[in-house]
Image (cartoon, grey):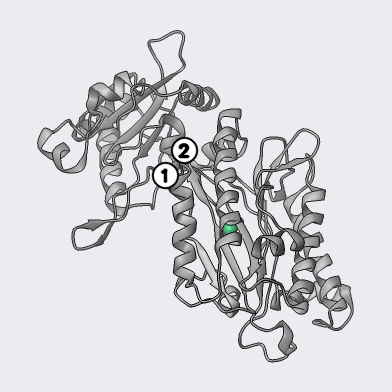
Amino acid sequence: MLLTQVPNYYQKRRETLIKAHPGSVFILPAAPELIRNSDVHYPFRQDSNFYYLSGFDEPESFLVLSSSQSTASRSSKMTLFVQPKNPEKEMWEGERYGVDGALQVFGADEAFVNSDIEQKLPEILKGAERIFYRLGVSESMDRRILAILESFRRSQGRSGRGLVSIEDPQAPLGEMRLFKEPEELDLLRKACHITALAHRTVMHELRPGMNEGEIEALVDYQFRKNGCQRLGYGSIVAGGKNAACLHYRSNNENLRSGDLLLIDAGGEYGYYTSDITRTIPVGKNFTQAQAQAYQLVLSVQKAGIALTRPGAKLPEIHKTTCELLVDGLLSLGLLKGNPAELLKNAAYRRFYPHNTSHWLGLDVHDAGLYTIEGEPRSLAAGMVFTIEPGFYVQPADRETPETFRNIGIRIEDDILVTSNGCEVLTREAPKEIAEIEALRS
Ligand code: GLY
Ligand code: MN
Ligand code: MN
């Protein structure tokens, strides 16, 4: 179904971007349409930056953002190049907005069919001081855009104006996307709410003997039923030892009582994704060793959340996570030695080989710099990120006592930094042992 109007926050974002980069031209192609096999395509999802600036989600299009020369009230000008209306194609593939829709629904200042870009882009580039275009995503797109830039450069003769630098738009857009506006938080909250409900449903419905794939489908169904358009990333549904494979995607083994089940799955709502991991017993209860390891990861995760406030830094949260994990692993007898040494030589990586956090938003590993001039950046209100410590025993690890084998645990929540602390956006997904065991029985 086509929209008749989009919210005006897209326009505000364009203004903000161009005000910060006057004289620049941003050239953003739509996400490429990828063939899966034969004539079957992967489902199309618009490029996150393109969507962030326009809300326009058709393939084969270009968004060009430049400084406005004519409208006094606006500093930015959006030109959309879109698929032409075509009744024959639309009968097969669905309705298109066409040039009129680009103007009327998406508020483009001008719009053309996509094949006009060779002719029209040079006009927009006149007087540009800098071009933002992401090289290296698609070779054929690079060739097409660079050919336009080259012919533009030639047309400039010896004015010297042809020497315009090309920069990656990810840097300025990442900086904007890192700080979530209220309308973005509404969508993220919704994604987190739906995702938490889906994890809760699994805690209730899971039975020994079910297949990992069945649980994957159940999560997917809950997301879609509650309004998510798609998944934010491929779900990890990993029973027993499979959870030690960090990017496990097979999701096709039967689940056995006595094992744990790790589910890392997030629904995408209005293009914003949640990212939740929960680890639960396939049977009714955690074994004693599973509960000990789980409680350790949970207390470490809560310590990370407690540190979150403006001014804190992600590497500090990671460092505390590692320190507390080392202490806990020493208490459980799974590591031996001096804590400072174990931290220094990263001995904990045998059980915890990944990082603790990443930004979250339109992309699961969202845009935004982690360091500024080589220094870790400080957290500030409006940033959203994950805290996801874990404990994994690799199947080949024969040194770890039998009771701790076949265990992979991760507990992951999505955290919004507020003016005086933080808000756990995914708090509706149970994580206390008592809550989980109550749902399992
Ligand atoms: N689901 C991907 C991650 O946790 O980073
Ligand atoms: Mn994550
Ligand atoms: Mn995750």
What is the quadrant of residue 332 in the picture?
bottom right
Question: In the image, is 142 to the left or to the right of 389?
Answer: left
Of all residues, the one furthest to the bottom in this rendering is 398
Task: Establish if 204 lies above or below 377.
Answer: below
Task: Answer with mark 2 or mark 1, whichever residue precedes in sequence.
Answer: 1
Task: Establish if 328 lies above or below 157.
Answer: below
Which of the four quarters of the rendered structure image does ligand 3 lie in? bottom right
Element type where label 1 sits in the image: loop
Residue at the spot x=46%, y=26% of the render? 10
What is the quadrant of residue 255 in the picture?
bottom right
Q: Which residue is mark 1?
A: 229
One can see residue 157 in this view: no
Q: Quadrant of the C terminus?
A: bottom right
Of residues 349 and 195, the one nearer the viewer is: 195
Q: Quadrant of the N terminus?
A: top left
Residue at the spot x=89%, y=79% of the render? 338
Residue at the spot x=67%, y=80% of the render? 393
- Which kind of residue does numbered mark 2 sit on? Gly
Q: Which residue is mark 2?
A: 270
Element type where label 2 sits in the image: loop
Q: Are marks 2 and 1 in contact (CB under 8 Å)?
A: yes
Residue 74 percent across, percent down from the top left:
45, 13
- Which kind of residue does numbered mark 1 sit on? Gln
Task: Establish if 402 lies above or below 31.
Answer: below
